[in-house]
Amino acid sequence: MVEKADQIFVLLQHWLVSFFPLAWQHAAGVVLDVVGIIVAYPTLFALAVLMERKGLGRMQNRYGPNRVGPFGLLQPAADGIKALIKEDIVPFRADAVVHFLAPLVLVVAVFMGLAVLPMGRNMELVDMDASLLFVFAMGASTELSVFMAGWSSRNKYSLLGAMRAVAQMISYEVPLLLSSVVIVMMTGSLSLTKMVEAQNHFTGIFPHWYVFTPWGLAGFVMFVVAAMAETNRSPFDLPEGESEIIAGYFTEYSGFKFALFFLGEYVGMFGIAGLGTTLFLGGWSAPASFLTWVPSWIWFFLKVELWICFFIWVRGTLPRLRQDQLMNFAWKFMLPMTLVNLVDAAVWRFMGEGWLRWVVCAAIVAGAYALMGRGGMRRQGLRPRSYRYAE
Amino acid sequence: MSIVFWMISALTLAGGLAAVLLKNLVHCALAVTVAFAGLALLFLQLDAQFAGFAQILVYIGAVAILVVFAILLTRNSETPKEGGVFSRTWLAGLAVAAAVFAVLGWAVLAGAKGLPGGAAAAPAVTVNEIGRALMGRYVLPLEIVALLLTAALIGAVIVAMHETLNVNGNGRAK
């Protein structure tokens, strides 16, 4: 019974596939899986948008949308209808072909990245040996669409936003990849399913998630920060700085194309949250050994929703980083920290079991943070603000 | 030579041709990106997963963006080239391209004689083996590439750094 609930989507897919003739069954199975993903993630996107607007509203001491439906629950539907029926304005001097293709490239790249996430036991769409590399390759392709959108609009502010966005995404891709390399090192495989299976063990009631180790915790923090920067979320949302350059690279998009950009951004958030869950938080494994009766996909989506709530929380709390602060942070702090983290994981691996390696590795990570973080702050020479008034 | 191979090759060739025949320079850069994607798909079709995904990650994710930035920030890319897309020295260009193609073709065909003929199964190269080869047998090329990249990085930093005032006061202020 527990296994049936755990594998309910897999069994559903097998049952639906059995209606097809034998020659078509493989293709039909793949198509059904893809339909499942395409149905599930935009639904989650709608819920996430609503959660964001209500959550941000509450943090800013106001209600979010509460007119459309009870507690504003039908607001995503209203937004969808609005996006569909709005006029699609393309600027006269804009490059029509590239302007059209940019949201398509974004959505395609983002949905492809979801194909290898293990959303439950046996529930990844494709099981590849190099699936982590595939996810990062798809993430790198999204930068191209950002640039295409900004350039084709023939708008100074769009181009500025696109340049900033691409510079930011490239800069933060390096700490993102390096903090995941630690996980690859400790698992010994690039395959996401193997990473989840390596974390699915328990000592007593504690799970063997990588986040509960010193190098895993440091890697997790850096992955979260880099993930926020990769998806252009606050406090890294200078490219779409809503109070400065209107909407940055998607200023000139209206109607359904804007909805596609929005969808692409949020599904990208889900993708990177799913990746972070798989790498650090144990994917679909339960947080305690007495909770393994809960289906695995519930744990996965619960953890992803926690990530999204955390992103929304940070957005409502922290102010925006300036472009040079952003780049300094990436190259001067996060890159050295990720390299120190790699050394830390290597020390962990070669020290053998015991309590000593916990102490040594935690000391390395904490010491590196203290030296580089605090030292870097002191080097900036931040003094109390001085004002000069006009006389 | 399956139908998938022909489709991917057509895509790659179309991208390559478009990259040299289009008038708008940024369009050319995007067509080169399509050609890169086609190459990555060819790698994947040959079951070289690491090479295919690394191609996407490096070429499309970094090199294409670099090319596009370089075009944007260095020339006025909105005016189309005067005189069409064929330059005046097209004959010399054709001769050089034919020479390069001849050398590459000779190298590939000469190397292909050493391979086991027929439909022999391709070796399944996993990322594990690539890693071991890089760290074991090919560690010297790896280190030389790292040295080259460091030199390029230092060069880029020096070019981009502000000039300091020299003794005569002729340099630009820092």
Image (cartoon, coloured by chain):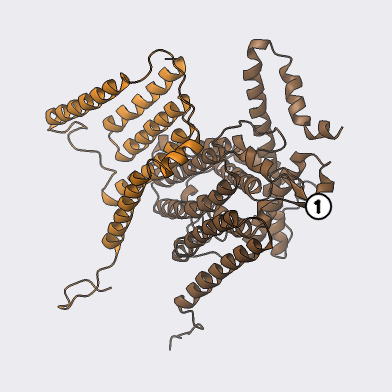
Residue A245 location (% of width, % of height): 47, 58
- At a point 62% along the width and 19% down the height, the residue shown is A27
Q: Is residue B128 visible?
A: yes
Picture coordinates of residue B30, whole percent (x, y): 37, 37
Q: Is residue B127 above or below residue B170?
A: above
Chain B: give its colour.
orange
The shade of chain A is: brown
* Residue at position x 29%, y 55% in the image: B151
At horizontal 23% and vertical 23% (from top left) the residue drawn is: B106
How many numbered badges does the structure rendering display? Answer: 1
A22 with respect to B68 (left or right):
right
Give the chain letter at badge 1.
Answer: A
Secondary structure found at label 1: loop
Q: Nearer the viewer, residue A78 or A176?
A: A176
Q: Quadrant of the N terminus of chain A?
A: top right
Residue that mark 1 sits on: A205
Q: Position of residue A28 (x, y in %)?
A: 65, 19
Q: Residue furthest right?
A: A1
Please say if A306 is above or below A112: below
Residue B137 falls in which quadrant of the image?
A: top left
A371 left or right, relative to A310: left
Q: Nearer the viewer, residue B65 or A88?
A: B65
Q: Which residue type carries mark 1?
A: Ile
- How far from the left and from the top, in percent, is residue A335? 48, 59
Q: Is residue A310 above or below residue A195?
A: below
Q: Quadrant of the C terminus of chain A?
A: bottom left
Q: Is residue A91 something that shows in the picture?
A: no
